[in-house]
Structure formats: structure tokens, C-alpha cells
Amino acid sequence: MSSHAHPVPHQPTGFVSKYIFSVDHKVIGIQYIMLAMTAVVIGVILSVIMRFHLAWPGAHIPFIQGGIMTPEQYAALLTMHGTIMVFFVLTTAPQGGFGNYFLPIQIGAPDMAFPHLNMLSFWVTFLAFVAILAAFVVPGGAPISGWTGYAPLSALGEVTGPGEGWGQTCWIISISLFCLASLLGALNFIATTIDMRAPGMSLFRMPLTVWGWFVTAILGLLAFGVLLAGGVLLLLDRSAGTSFFIPAGTVVNDQLQPHSGGSPLLWQHLFWFFGHPEVYIAILPGMGVASHVLSTFSRKPVFGYRAMAGAICGIGFLGFMVWGHHMFVSGMSPYSGFAFSVLTMSIGVPSAIKTFNWLGTLWNGKIIFKTPMLFALGFVSLFVSGGLSGLFLAQPAVDNRLHATYYVVAHFHLVMGVAAIFGIFAAMYFWFPKMFGRMMSEPLGKIHFWFTFVGAYLIFMPMHWLGIAGGIRRYADYTAVDFLKPLQPVHNFITWAAFVTAGAQIFFLWNFFWSLKHGAKAGKNPWNATTLEWDTDSPPPLDNFGGHYPSVYRGPYEFSVPGAVEDFVPQHLAPAEVARTK
């Protein structure tokens, strides 16, 4: 094997420098993953409490102030659930966690381009997480403005309701800090991918996971700066008397507000110019992982590799042109609505390329149904199911009818939330042996998959019907309105499905923490995979390759190569080292 030597960096000696304020991208990746695991437990608990209230709105809940949940308390739970899941789970785990850990190894680099900036990015993210949790305990409690923080509700302060004082301020500070951390991380990802690839690692020899993280970083660099600016302006409206988002003549609780000249629609534009790329920031890493895992466990090259890489870039490019479809109900011009509708439909083209190429990768493959493969297949299923409902919402005439209903909840949870979570699970089960040197339990992994996969469909498919039947989203009590009462049995069914699905995550948590100490020991390459991370030890040494960095001779998915003895040929093997049949 051809390799080039580099000096090995000195191992940190103290616990703090090794595990807390570490500059090793692998330790930072694990820190991001643990933060996301903490966040997802909190987010799921909030969703279970909301579902309990929707099924039994008059029930007494011991830890809720007053015993019976009020609509304002429900809105606060909804706001915090959405914010924590979108920012601190769906953005943090795929990019900050697995991207930080594996991008340098997969391109043959010793670390990220800017290790200290990488450390700073994590700790700013951690501060953002602390700020959002602080919203629960400050006077007035958590904000009620939704995870989108629409103005003027979010811009005027506590006069607009409970949680809109210090709670909303904590929310804005948290989101602004998160944006800053994401900008630092995006710069690092882009510089590392462009400048630190191993000899022979051309762009079209990069794994599709790296393409996903690279394009996601570009999206983050362009999108998070816009939301950061919006957050600063929103904070100024609340604390400095400005009027960026507050129009003249605004009356709240019979009080005329001393603002003029602002526009609530400006906040919507700024938020959704970030918000729609955020959908792809959450899903593109999962697309890369799904492509990677499907190829490995079908023992076939990725079908149409260059088209798949191009589709990732196309999705990223078009993702910046469709934010207006979130605002069809804002009173926009029909001509603008038509333009955003056409652009929204066009993003289905690269998405369809990826879907059909995934099917092409599976076709006639020697499929091995290990747990990572099951979650990758689940990702494809959920992405397609959620994406199909998006075709209807892309039409302004249809969206105007369904926008405020559970149809939208079902759509974005399937395509952005659950599909992305399945990508995270596929990555965890696939790379756990490399990260920790041990295997996770296959039986527990399969139990976890089937409960989660079936449960996701039982939760979110009925929500499509709820939306078509007129079920209003963000509404706290269906029994209080006559025309919504017939839909209550559907909510009860969804709630029981949510309880079972949430409970099934205990299988994953037990499997994860038990396997850290007691899982079967993993070799360098337990999956017989081809990319560079499987050329090094499990877990990798400090500089990833022990001072001898590989060169790259071929693409990332050389499976079932004609004439080769093995059914896979790693990227780092020189042509002369590939064993061939006579």
C-alpha cells in the first residue's frame, strides 16, 4: 500500500485538554453527538407531553403549573420541541457529529483545517443549548411564538403573552449563538474538503457522504448568516425601540405599541430564506449516508455516482430559490406564488434522480439486511413518502387550504424530521464500530428499527387525513370546537402510536451504552467497506492514520469488481496490490 509519512502530533495529557476542550475532530464529533442525544431525549419528552394533552385535554398533569395544561403552555411546549429538534438534533447530529468525525478521515486528512475554530464552534453550540434550556426557567417561562418566531408576536415583549418576555429573549439569543457556531463550522468543513484531500482524492473520488457534508456546509454558510442578521434585528426591536418587524398602529391587549414602519413579512422572508435551506441542511447528510450504506450492503457500486453528486449540488442550489412556498398564505402576488410553485416542483427532479439511483443501486444487489441497511432503506421510504405530499403543498391553491392543518405537520415531519433521524440511526449503527471499537447488538438494532419504522408511519400517515378533514395544527384542545370533535379518535390513535414509538427508543439507548463496554470487539473493517475510514484502527489514533496517510487510486464504491478475488477493492490499495483471479 502506498502511503506518505507525516509527524504524529503529541497526545494531550490532561483530562480537560483530551476530552473537554479538545481540538481533535473525533472528540468534538462525539461531543456533538452526545449533545444531540441529550437534546433528542428532551425533544421527544416534550412531544409525548403534547400528545398526552391532545388525547386527554382535561387530564391533570402533576408537573404542569396549575395542573391542567393551558393553550399558552401547549404553545410553549410546541415552540421548544420544534426549536430543539430542528437546531440541536437534526442540524447538530448529522453535520456537527458524524461530519466532524468522519469527513477528515474519509478524505485522508489528519484533522479539520482549523482545529481550534472547530472546538470554538462546539462550545458556542453548547452555550446556545444552555440558552434555549434557560427559557424553561426564566420568569414567564418558555416562548409561545412557535419555532419560527413570527413577528410581531416575538418582537413586542411580554405584552403579547406569557413567555414573550425573558423566554423569547433566551430563544433569540440561543438561535443567534447557534447561527454563529454553524458559520464557524461551515468555514471549517469547506476549507477542509477543498484543501486537505489525500493524494489522488479528486472531487469525484470523494464518498457521497463527503459531498453531502460539503454542500451542507455551503448551505449553512449562506443561510445561517441571514438568520443571524434577522435575530439581531429582532432583538433590537424588543430591547432598543427599533421597528424592523413591527408596523405602525399595532394594538396588543388594548395598548397601542410605540413602533412604526416595520414589516412582519420581512421577518418571514429572512427566516424562510434560512428555513428552507435548513430542510436540506438536515436531510443532505442523511442522503449521503443512505447512499454510502446502500452501496456497502448491496455489494454494488452506487448507481450513477456522478449524477448522485450532481443531484446533491442541484438540491443545494435550488433550495435557496423556493423559500416563498412557506409564505403562500401571506398574501403574496399570484405571479410570485406561481414562480415559487414552479421552482418548488423543479427541486423534485434532483430528488427523483437520487431516489431512482438508490433503487438502481439495490437492483440485483447481494443485499445484506444488517441494521444500518434497514435504517438506510427506511430513510429512502420515509423521504419518498414525505416528499410526495410536498408536491401538493407546492401548489398555492392547495396550500392555502392545507397550510394551517396537520397535513403540513405530517409532510415536514416525514421528509425532514423522521427521515433525517433514520439517516442519523443508519450512521450510528454503521460507524459505531469505527468510533468505539465495538459492535452494537444486531437483535436489539432490528427490534429498534421495526418499532420505529412502523411507529413513524402510524403517527404521521393519519395526520395527512387529519389535515384534509380540517384538523388545525398548533391547536391545543380538539374537544373545545364542535367541528373538530369527530377527529378526536384519530388523535387518540396517534398518541398511542407515539407512546409506543418513543418507548422503543429505549432499545437504542440501551444498545448504545451497553455496547460501549460489552459489545463484541470490532476489527478495522467489519463491513468489508471500501472508503478510507476503514483503513485505520477502530477507534482511529489521534492523527487518524498513525503518521502514514493513504493515497487514493479509485472511486469510493468499488464493489463486485470483475476479476478481483474479493468482492470489494478499497480506495487506498494500489492497482498492483489488488488480488485478482488468474
Image (cartoon, rainbow, N blue to C red):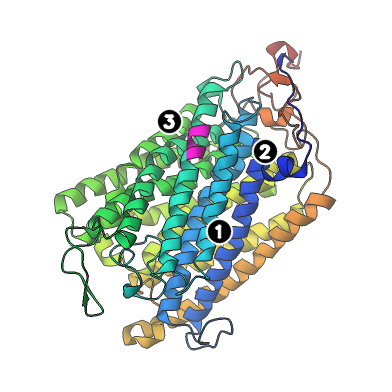
**For residue 316, above or below residue 414:** above
Mark found first going from the N terminus, 1 or 2 = 2
Q: What amino acid is found at the position of numbered circle 3 in the picture?
A: Gly
> Residue 59: where, in percent of width, then height?
52, 88
User: What SS does tag 1 mark?
Assistant: helix
Q: Is residue 254 visible?
A: yes
- 565 and 238: which one is in front? 238
User: What SS does tag 3 mark?
Assistant: helix
Cα distance between the residues tagged 1 and 2 = 23 Å
- 247 and 459: which one is in front? 247
Frontmost of labels 1 and 2 is 1
Magenta segment: 184-189
Looking at the image, residue 352 sits to the left or right of residue 160; the answer is right
Q: Are marks 3 and 1 in contact (CB under 8 Å)?
A: no
Frontmost of labels 3 and 1 is 1
Q: Residue at x 34, y 39 (%)?
A: 318
Which residue lies under the disc numbered 3? 310
Q: Residue at x 59, y 54 (%)?
A: 36
Name the residue at the top extreme: 576
Looking at the image, residue 200 sits to the left or right of residue 1; the answer is left
Mark found first going from the N terminus, 3 or 2 = 2
- 163 inside magenta stretch: no
> Residue 102: where, in percent of width, then height?
63, 36
Using a 10 Å C-alpha cutoff, classify the residue at mark 1 as few (fewer than 14 neighbours), some (14 to 19) or many (20 or more): few
**For residue 567, above or below residue 440:** above
Identify the disc placed on residue 26: 2
Q: Identify the image quadrant of the C terminus.
A: top right
Which residue lies under the disc numbered 1? 130
